[in-house]
Image (cartoon, helix red, strand yellow):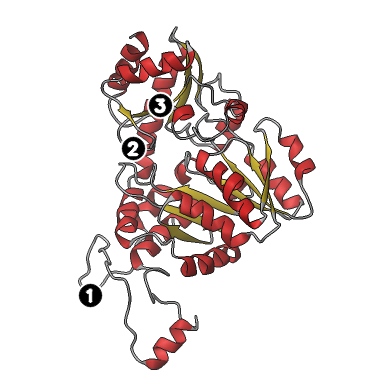
Amino acid sequence: MNSKHIETEAIRTQIERSQYLEHSSPLFLTSSYVFEDAEDMRASFADEKQRNIYSRYSNPNTSEFVEKVCKMEGAERGYAFASGMSAVFSTFAALLNSDDHVISSRSIFGSTQTLFNNILPKWNISTSYFKIDELDTIESLIQPNTKVIYAESPTNPAVDILDLQRLGDIAKKHNLIFIIDNCFATPYLQQPIKFGADLVIHSATKLMDGQGRVLGGVTVGSGDLIQKIYLFSRNTGPALSPFNAWVLSKSLETLPVRVDRHCDNALKVATFLEANDHVNFVKYPFLKSHPQYELAKKQMKLGGNVVAFEIKGGIEAGRKFLNAIKLLSLSANLGDTRTIVTHPASTTHAKIPEDVRLETGITSGLIRVSVGLEHPEDIINDLKQALEN
């Protein structure tokens, strides 16, 4: 089945039916698989056959999930992981050697910064950073040992937008691997491979699951690069569980319709916040006031579900605002059916030095709202009363 429409691919991409002719893909809760005879076993372990051997390597449920993401992203191949951060770490660990160099956007998730700053240096892997509005500095950061350009777009948590085509052109010019974290956009809103990305990473825990139930991650892209990631991962063990893969594959079937509503609600919330006297500024990609509004419209179908705003009064006002929330959830997750309010400076980015946080727009009063699927009036009313109280 080949369709040009993501909505159809997300629903109709399924593993082969069993003898029972089930309509919905079954759950394969098995750690291992049997062989017909000694020759079948030998050929399978010699990679002469494409088949399931052990669920750390592959499983029908993880294969279905990965195939769906590949079709939605326009990727050749992929591998699924136990979490988004295991996807990030394993991707870099598989592709980098000691003394390699990474160029990354400064505006990235806190745990990814910790990986670059504290963990990869153990293997003499270094990272240089560029600001999201200073892409013209990237080429000056390239060294003989540079191997990767990495970025998020939209960024977490300040929802800035990077020019993916420009990053892709730079990577291609210098023969670098271009990796994009596409978690905030999902493949429904944005396909970075179209702009030159070699690999795309997702925390499937977020909008792909969409209901805050399971952890998962996935990397998709070039077949040659995924083969290296697969060989690394099959030996180091960060595989996604079959049950979580089954849940995530089912979730992808409703991703487009869910994300449409998320984005509609988020734009309403952003518009309300922009007009509120208690707010200094609002960042949402599809607000005309967003610094990269035109770029967002070029790269993305809609603006996503995350809104960032700064409360007047700094960290104390932020604390009072969070304590006044009644309906919405205080959590560090995002992409849930339930609207979630987060204070990045004290949670997801708390371990990042203050000067670095400020450099990426994470002020002490910045609030990140992952807008859910409740009625928009109810979301707005809770934000309104919390701001006023």
Q: Position of residue 219 (x, y in %)?
A: 50, 55
Image quarter in which the N terminus is found: bottom left
Q: Residues within 10 Å of mark 1 (few under 14, many from 20)?
A: few
Whether residue 280 is situated above or below residue 144 in the rendered picture = above
Q: Which residue is mark 2?
A: 336
Whether residue 147 is situated above or below residue 329 in the rendered picture = below
Q: Earlier in the sequence, mark 1 or mark 2?
A: 1
Horizontal side of 365 relative to 59 (left or right) equals right
Q: Position of residue 82 (x, y in %)?
A: 40, 56
Q: Is residue 6 visible from the viewing direction of this image?
A: yes
Q: Position of residue 346 (x, y in %)?
A: 45, 28
Whether residue 314 is situated above or below residue 73 in the rendered picture = above
Q: Secondary structure at mark 1?
A: loop
Q: Earlier in the sequence, mark 3 or mark 1?
A: 1
Q: Secondary structure at mark 3?
A: helix
| Residue 266 circle label | 3
Q: Position of residue 78 (x, y in %)?
A: 49, 60
Q: Which residue is mark 1?
A: 19
Q: CA distance from mark 3 to mark 1?
A: 45 Å
The image quadrant that residue 166 belongs to is: top right
Q: Residues within 10 Å of mark 2 (few under 14, many from 20)?
A: many
**Relative depth, front residue between 170 and 369:** 369
Q: CA distance from mark 2 to mark 3?
A: 13 Å
What amino acid is labelled 1 in the image?
A: Gln
What amino acid is labelled 3 in the image?
A: Ala
What amino acid is labelled 2 in the image?
A: Asp
Q: Residue furthest bottom?
A: 38
